[in-house]
Image: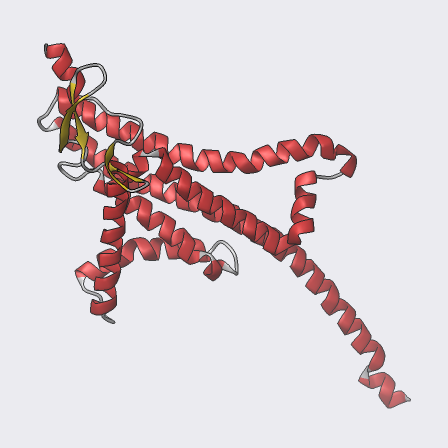
Amino acid sequence: MPEEEGESLIHVAIKAEELFQLGPLHVTNSMVGALLASVVLLAGAWWFARRNQLVPTRVQSLLELPIELMAGIISASTSRWRSYAALILGFFLIILVANWIGLLPGVGTIGIAHVDETGHEAVIPLVRPASADLNFTLGLAIVSFVMFVFWGIRANGAGGYLKELLGQPLYMAPLMFPINLISEFSRLISLSMRLFGNVFAGEVLLATMIALVPILVPAAFLGLELIFGFVQALVFALLAMTYISTAIAEHHSAGHDSDHDTDHGAAHAAGADHPPAAEAASA
């Protein structure tokens, strides 16, 4: 009996548990966590819009701190950072809030008791960290992947983007195209699996520590998870920014060379049409 009780205490399911069903929609506890994170962000934006002051208060400074941090990093990426800054900030904030909500008391522990397939009594948590569900992280990764491909096509054109996938020289295309295609899709997998794996591992670690040593020791791990939650949100946002800015930077470099050649040709033509003043005076 003690072994069974200990097993039930540290039970953490990889798959998000279903709470109820609304028509074709199956509502899971990780969806509740994502919804809570969205509500917190909307409430923070509403408060910030109504209470924004030129001389910030402590609460306003606290809300501005992560935004200013990310804005400083994004603005140093490319000259066109304003076009994708909102997307990167959105990634960072939703992941950060979702990760930290998972550390609140009762999240992952308070739920509905039921008997599983093996006949053991278990608890379905009402709220689960959204990032501990692969559906959530994969959804964010798909959005990032679509935006990266969009910027690649926008920067180089559909033909230019396809030419990059084919590689150079063209006779190597049968070998390089599958490799480059796999490399593109590997970004989608790495973004989703990295975030999911780290957050899920932290959830399992906290559940284990609370079950084994319920006093004082879990507090140290909660502090570590606060840091890890911030780092994971930052890493996801920076990787998404890097993928997008790489496509823009390559196009900007090529466009800069083209503009330089155009300006040089224009200056040469202007010099031919308008000879120097000394030559004009001597004439």
Q: Is residue 129 in view from this perspective?
A: no
Q: Quadrant of residue 87?
A: bottom left
Q: Give the residue displayed 36% in from the left and 44% down from the top.
A: 234
Q: Is residue 109 in view from this perspective?
A: yes
Point out residue 99 in the picture as x, y percentages from the top left corner: 27, 40
Q: Quadrant of residue 278?
A: bottom right
Point out residue 137 in the picture as x, y percentages from the top left corner: 38, 38
State the residue in front, 101 or 252: 101
Q: Residue furthest front?
A: 23
Q: Give the residue displayed 24% in from the left and 25% down from the top.
A: 12
Q: Is residue 265 left or right of residue 86?
A: right
Point out residue 186 in the picture as x, y percentages from the top left corner: 52, 34
Q: Residue furthest left?
A: 215
State the residue in front, 106 or 199: 106
Quadrant housing the N terminus = top left
Q: Quadrant of residue 131?
A: top left
Residue 283 lies, with reference to residue 50, above or below; the image says below
Residue 211 lies, with reference to residue 249, above or below; the image says above
Point out residue 254 in the picture as x, y percentages from the top left corner: 67, 55
Residue 153 lies, with reference to residue 173, above or below; the image says below
Q: Is residue 158 left or right of residue 76?
A: right
